[in-house]
Image (cartoon, coloured by chain):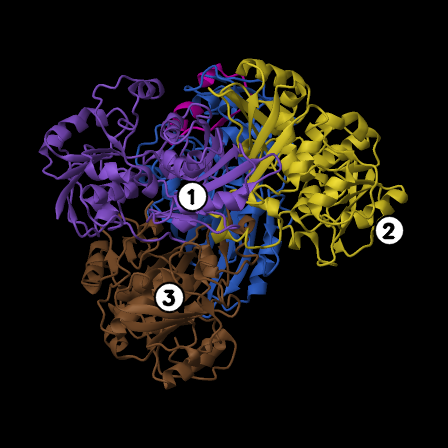
Chain colours: A blue, B yellow, C purple, D brown
Amino acid sequence: MIKVGIVGASGYTGGELLRFLKNHSNAEVVAATSRKFDGIPIHKVHPHLRDIDLKFENLKPSEIDADLVFTATPHGASMKIVPELIEEGVKVVDLSGDYRFEDTDVYEKWYGFKHTNPLDAVYGLPEINRAEIKKADLIANPGCFPTGAILACLPIVAEKLVDTIIVDSKSGVSGAGVKPTEASHYPNCSDNVAPYAVTSHRHMPEIQEKLRKFGDVKVSFTPHLVPVTRGILTTAHSFLKEDVSSDYVKEIYDKFYEGEPFVRVLDTSEIPRLSSVRGSNYCHIGCFDIDENGRIVLVSAIDNLVKGASGQAIQNMNLMFRFPETESIETVGLHP
Amino acid sequence: MIKVGIVGASGYTGGELLRFLKNHSNAEVVAATSRKFDGIPIHKVHPHLRDIDLKFENLKPSEIDADLVFTATPHGASMKIVPELIEEGVKVVDLSGDYRFEDTDVYEKWYGFKHTNPLDAVYGLPEINRAEIKKADLIANPGCFPTGAILACLPIVAEKLVDTIIVDSKSGVSGAGVKPTEASHYPNCSDNVAPYAVTSHRHMPEIQEKLRKFGDVKVSFTPHLVPVTRGILTTAHSFLKEDVSSDYVKEIYDKFYEGEPFVRVLDTSEIPRLSSVRGSNYCHIGCFDIDENGRIVLVSAIDNLVKGASGQAIQNMNLMFRFPETESIETVGLHP
Amino acid sequence: MIKVGIVGASGYTGGELLRFLKNHSNAEVVAATSRKFDGIPIHKVHPHLRDIDLKFENLKPSEIDADLVFTATPHGASMKIVPELIEEGVKVVDLSGDYRFEDTDVYEKWYGFKHTNPLDAVYGLPEINRAEIKKADLIANPGCFPTGAILACLPIVAEKLVDTIIVDSKSGVSGAGVKPTEASHYPNCSDNVAPYAVTSHRHMPEIQEKLRKFGDVKVSFTPHLVPVTRGILTTAHSFLKEDVSSDYVKEIYDKFYEGEPFVRVLDTSEIPRLSSVRGSNYCHIGCFDIDENGRIVLVSAIDNLVKGASGQAIQNMNLMFRFPETESIETVGLHP
Amino acid sequence: MIKVGIVGASGYTGGELLRFLKNHSNAEVVAATSRKFDGIPIHKVHPHLRDIDLKFENLKPSEIDADLVFTATPHGASMKIVPELIEEGVKVVDLSGDYRFEDTDVYEKWYGFKHTNPLDAVYGLPEINRAEIKKADLIANPGCFPTGAILACLPIVAEKLVDTIIVDSKSGVSGAGVKPTEASHYPNCSDNVAPYAVTSHRHMPEIQEKLRKFGDVKVSFTPHLVPVTRGILTTAHSFLKEDVSSDYVKEIYDKFYEGEPFVRVLDTSEIPRLSSVRGSNYCHIGCFDIDENGRIVLVSAIDNLVKGASGQAIQNMNLMFRFPETESIETVGLHP
């Protein structure tokens, strides 16, 4: 049984980590930090987690006695606490963007501030880095949009079938976090679809950097906020460089993801749906249709808080400690 | 390992039974019947259940080789197949209304047709009938509204504090079933709240018959359809016969439900919320506020498809076979 | 053509006043005040109002040169500016709670602070006070819940058929205003139904004070937030003192509201729906069902921002200036 | 005052025609046909339209005594009744796809059946065909997706700045019509985003045929169903052939749509939103952002039932009869 700490446990990703770890046979949460809710029982903030005998604590990272710490902290905040934890021999899964880029310049350009503590980290997408994750001390847990987009596009990029991809993503509002804002105000997002950061979202360079390791590809990315609580539906449009069939592409995907515990390539004619993965760590991929102009459409569905954040973080922890990869995150989606 | 059959497995309650039983250590689904989808793999109808190696089959009850059968069949249909199963020594949990009433006249009056096969059944609400359920061969699984309403009102009725209750319930649309109708048509139910069967819903006499075993009480019941997928929020209004305090009533509830694995009495000032129980078998109860007119308000939240149907059905199965009561249904709600 | 000012024009009720007045033949908006948005064009805040040649201004009431001012200001703020306007001979329609109560003690008890400037005002519900409104200088525009509840219950109270009413109301989130809060955060209110201020909402004494002029009645009130943008669906439960029929009650309602321009009594078997009144000044009333316990159910539907606020405010203005009562607010609901 | 008939008046577009025509100074509805609801008052089907003294009638086109008939009939049905009406000298605005294509072969390919009655029709998008519409006897009212897509892309195509466009559209569920189906079943579309007819939607060739009159362009189109009642948000992605700036493109749009009564080009940094046009005949266009790959993003918002159907149909009628173009359809959107 390893000891686990969660820094920034009062947000949605903190809540999801607690939800999964509650049932983990090999890991126990020993600390859930929060400045704002210091001393408050967990269930006052996460009303569904009623039987966890734990309170939020306002702890410094050094005060956490754990084998692994999840840093569910904002961009810019993680870099201030992760190095100290690593130095003390604590393994870290960081859920922010701070350690996702190999190229620090790209990070600084898109995040708009100086990176004060660059460290070597492994990008925690098990479908591409499983072996490295197992040996890592610091995991940069992928962004939610990148998880959906990379998994949707990876095989076709690796096969060199495309050189440009337009990723049009639709995200649920929980992706904007637990804090009320104009964007998450019910009358603003209900009955609406809102494109945002239309050509300037920080997940674009992340998608691009990771895909480029597999093939030379330019990514254009536009996210939309949709009136959905959880889930990201990614529609990737690409023009094929070769005249291949839909079935041929599907076979590439079947082969690429064979044996992956959390990726499911759907049958032809099935369309991924958010409810199929709601609350679960699965990514469903489908479509493969090709139109008269040679455009292929690939669609993926994930839960932004699970495979797009906390579920994947636990999948990474499981790999790092050689636990069964699916431990505590094997439940299927909540449909309907 | 017992063998389980599901009759009528293509609806929402069938899907939920399959979702839970997938992870049950002591039960295995050997047959999932459907006339319409005979020969079709499960995941074509329940798109989240991708790794179940099972097809729908058009089987007669007698063709199912099982220790227990869940009959997820419509009112009026169950009575045609349950007796045969019972006769063959198969235990049955029936999810329809056919065996819920002690008084067959009440059934016939409210359901509008003759009951052709009355049998002795135990009303499967473990919070009131746990001992009987353990010994039963036939369980009448409670209705969704009655589950929420009875659990909300039971302690106060048992304590003889009220003699009239107005139950104003708000149900998610999945309660209307998998089949598209005018009532479930998105443009009709989105952005709307629709009272229906305002004084004539068949769950009223069910609530009343069960509560009356604990105290002399008249129940008035009005359900509403709200733009929610899963969940029933029940607001029960009653005028207190005695001048008691909110805290006093809360204590009665704390005591009444002490040790119950799936009922949680919330702290004062907490309001039950649907997301706290979404996808889970829990019932949250709270409020206890009393106004100037002596009206007390009790609020409960359940997932209509789980504690209001399939989760409770499995809880009953667990009791009948002396499995741990929470086996396969212990997950908490999906919040947010 | 009269000159109209709107104090507090950047909120939802301000936006609705501007939307309706845009098409008013006899009234012109000369000032729309806002401290926060001083100098900003209207459409930057109200994105649907693109062709209004007006900017928000940070004006004192005395700086507004108008025949009538709508004070769309918070409770407690109105009382600081209304007296000055009245003194200068400006007519006022106040949308806050500050002038709604005849009994200042009741106001102070429920609103929790001292009323510094009590004035004689007419409660602006045209269906009960049309004659007085025409002569008034100061109108207290009714609350949103009271508008729905009073119109639903008035005839049956006036007929002395009931002495207790339980009002269970379901409100859209726009009722919580334009400012993002936890209550209006999409992941909190989507897929949920949240009772609030369960026995302590300030609209209860308002409903009661106004209904009591027509009959001796006790009102118990509980509001709920539902995942709807606009609209209040009110379900009023009452036990009848006499054994009358549903048809008899419907006739009372037909007669009571005969000729009312904005109230429609629905046919038997029709249920009021929010989309039928969405965006409109209409109130639909229906149901009249009576159950075995003698409980009658009355249901009304309004748009909280229109008949529950700004539409009714303009109806009052129309009456005060002897314009046609329906001028600029005659459009029907937006269904679906 | 002209006499107007509506064939197929019980659907959503029929309801919208009735809603607008209710307030038209120059047109009166003399017949609203429906086979299913023959003899039924309008408000039983369109519950918001309570004061229209009209019943549905099961009439043949020849039995309608009107100056203009709106055929709100399905694809394939219109071609069976329109020729007869035209022959009798009745003007027709057809809301189906039957007369939208200049090339009948394209129609037959994409709609999958033989066109039995080709006629000369004017494509009723006033922004491109105003002069022809004024002289036309038969108007093919544009499809909902094409209206949003063409208006979003027209200026940039006319300016020859792009040769390929990927149109990723998000439509509200009312676009699927009044009849309940699996696609419109609340538990299926709530909390989900569903791409459909991913490369095979019949609106693609319509968009392409119309845009090609202005520039040589290939259109790829994918629609999505989103949990919204009304509205289409269109995101058009194109790679610019020349290195122009965002401001330059915005100026082209400003100039192109100058004076258009129902198109509004938004300021830089404003994003079109569905609530701004909800229930209205406006089309809002904005964005103009260009990313590092030279991709420009154009976004438009319309109400699918209004500018995408019935509002535009009335705009066409107004032009045909030289009524003021905005008569009865000048109201702004319902925000929030």
- Nearer the observer: mark 3 or 1; the answer is 1
- Nearer the observer: mark 2 or 1; the answer is 1
Marks 3,1: beta carbons within 8 A: no
> Which residue is nearer to you in this view: B269 or C132?
C132
Provide the residue designation for mark 2.
Answer: B62
Is A69 a magenta residue? yes
Q: Image check: B35 left or right of A151?
A: right
- Cα gap from disc 3 to disc 2, whole angstroms: 56 Å
- Nearer the observer: mark 3 or 2; the answer is 2
Q: Image check: A225 left or right of A336?
A: left
Residue at left offset 31%, top offset 50%: D276
- Cα gap from disc 3 to disc 1, whole angstroms: 36 Å
Q: Please provide the residue range marked out in magenta.
A: A58-82
Q: Give me the chain letter of mark 1.
A: C
| Percent x, y of residue C67 | 13, 39
Task: Classify mark 3: helix, strand or loop.
Answer: helix
Provide the residue designation for mark 1.
Answer: C301
| Percent x, y of residue B4 | 80, 43
Q: Give me the chain letter of mark 2.
A: B
Decide: few, some or many residues near mark 1? Use Cα within 10 Å; few <14, some 14-19, many ≥20.
many
Amino acid type, label 2: Ser
> Which residue is nearer to you in this view: A116 or B229?
B229
Q: Give me the chain letter of mark 3.
A: D
* Residue D146 tag number: 3
